[in-house]
Image (cartoon, rainbow, N blue to C red):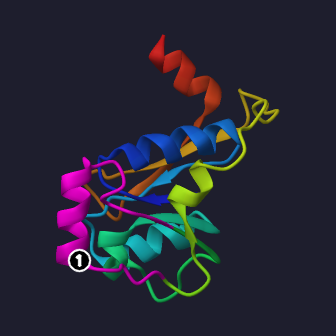
Amino acid sequence: MGLLLPNTPHFIVAYNATCLLGGTVVAVNPLMPVPKIKRELKETGCRILIILDRLLEKLPEEAPETMIVAEAAHYAPAHLRLLSALKYGDTRRPAGSLKLEDLITGPRLNEAAETAPKEALAVIMYTSGTTGDPKGVMLTHYALVANAL
């Protein structure tokens, strides 16, 4: 699951939910130009993308098959949500896309997905070196826990 989100609560919710469901997170830097975003999504075979409504202009033409749009103002205080609505109006979501806020208020998951922690990918993180394009580094659930410990 691609996450085209800045450092907002949406990212934390989507990242943890993806790991809990046994998916693989591909965190895409929203500051990158569209061609680089397209390359990372294509290389990882990303089929689902969660994108902030304010970043829809960064959406590549060949977008993943499932789109989930997060509202930037969702976690803001009420007065800032009102100001955001006045400034930006109704955000135009791509046809057929889902709304993140509708998904997070749905039924709770009773248990996490069964995964093999040493083999199951949790994250593909792109890192750049001194030569060539950034490369996707594959991290397992086990590696993330070992790193945290």
For the point 73% across and 34% down, the residue is 119
Question: Which of 37 and 130 lies nearest the eye of the viewer?
Answer: 37
Q: Quadrant of residue 57?
A: bottom left
Residue located farthest toward the top when viewing the structure as drawn: 149
Left or right of 15 on screen, residue 34: left
Q: Position of residue 99 (x, y in %)?
A: 54, 66
Identify the residue shown where x is 78% and y is 31%.
110
Give the side of residue 35 with respect to residue 122, left or right.
Answer: left
Residue 10's x, y, as percent?
Answer: 41, 49
Dividing the picture into quadrants, the one containing residue 22 is top right
Is residue 113 found left or right of 32 in the rendered image? Answer: right
Q: Which residue is mark 1?
A: 88
The residue type indicated by label 1 comes to: Tyr
Residue 10 colored in magenta in the image: no
Whether residue 80 appears in magenta in the rendering, the answer is yes
The image shows residue 50, relative to residue 7, as above or below, that is below
Query: Which stretch did the figure color magenta?
Result: 69-93
